[in-house]
Image (cartoon, helix red, strand yellow):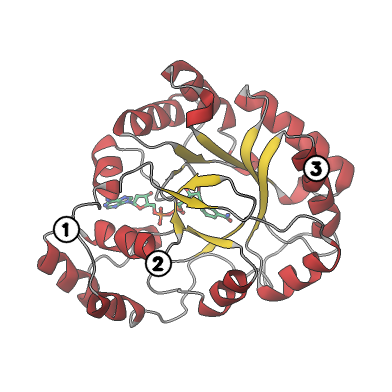
Amino acid sequence: MSLTSTLKLNNGKEIPAIGLGVYKVEAGDEVYQSVKSALEVGYRHIDTASLYGNEEGVGQAIKDSGIPREEIFVTTKVWNDEQGYEETKAAFQRSLDRLQMDYVDLYLVHWPVPGKFKETYKALEEIYREGKAKSIGVSNFMPHHLEELMKDAEVTPVVNQIELHPQLQQDETREYCKKHGILIEAWAPLGKARYFDHPVLQELSSKHGKTPAQIIVRWQYQSEIITIPKSVHKKRQEENVDIFDFDLSSDDMEKMASMNIEKRIGKHPDEFDYGV
Ligand code: NAD
């Protein structure tokens, strides 16, 4: 078990179970340095998006790292105002150009824009068939969005990237996805570091001699949830993945489960202002 441990996607490809998120990391030097240091730490999975405005720096850092492209798993996403069949195909090419890549490992529909996400996904299927995205998936989809999507989809999404952390465990969506062979990827996996003082995290931290961030990442790892904690600081990037030298017991896992209060930090997908 290590930072390059992978989970198998429903199309046979592998995804490193832990990656680096770069939401709100500034374009230019900040994103460049944070991807560079993460690759030095040993991360081999980077999660960006068209929305983040930092794909250029991600691509440049990967290019300059000297690590063979095929050893790094890169995800990007189509933003809401780029959705629709033709629009998405054009948006995808812009992402590739910014990343200076000829393929991405995973391309996601960022949010289920009503009336558009099915056409958007059709473009993803086309991109997948062309081999320019090795896998395709969705983000922020509830079971009802997936039901709607799968009525016509020819390619099952490999992942659903959703807000998921100890206070928002998303049991219903997890169960639905499991049934359909779709892996869950957690965004805001650390709950944006907002409740590290929670008694359960404090208790498990003392018990294992690990930080709350490490307890959370380990919990996700043991739950087979792909996780992409964000930090721009090398020390924290190291801390967040230093989780392979301990186990959470089934009792510890139950304590983690007890933290769930279904409390979102971000928007509910059915209440998001899509502006359409
Ligand atoms: P997160 O839960 O990863 O928290 C990140 C914040 O926690 C950092 O900004 C930092 O301040 C703090 N932090 C990180 N490590 C720490 C440590 N060891 N100790 C103390 N504080 C620490 O939140 P996130 O960045 O919102 O989510 C992770 C990634 O998920 C994003 O970067 C992005 O790639 C992705 N994401 C996707 C969506 C989506 O709609 N698909 C939405 C939000 C985020």
Which quadrant of the structure image shows residue 29? Answer: top left
Q: Which residue is mark 2?
A: 223
Residue 66, placed above or below residue 125: above
Q: Residues within 10 Å of mark 3 (few under 14, many from 20)?
A: many
Q: Residue at x 39, y 50 (%)?
A: 229
Q: Amino acid at mark 2?
A: Ser
Are the residues tagged 2 and 1 within 8 Å (C-beta)? no
In screen coordinates, is 8 left or right of 179? left
Q: Which residue is mark 3?
A: 88
**Can residue 138 be seen by looking at this rendering?**
yes
Which quadrant of the structure image shows residue 98? Answer: top right
Which quadrant of the structure image shows residue 211? Answer: bottom left
User: Disc 1 beta carbon < 8 A from ligand 1?
Assistant: no
Where the C terminus falls, by quadrant? bottom right
Q: CA distance from mark 2 to mark 1?
A: 18 Å
Q: Residue at x 69, y 24 (%)?
A: 97
Q: Which residue is mark 1?
A: 210
Query: x%, y% of residue 126?
Result: 82, 42
4, 29: nearer the viewer: 4
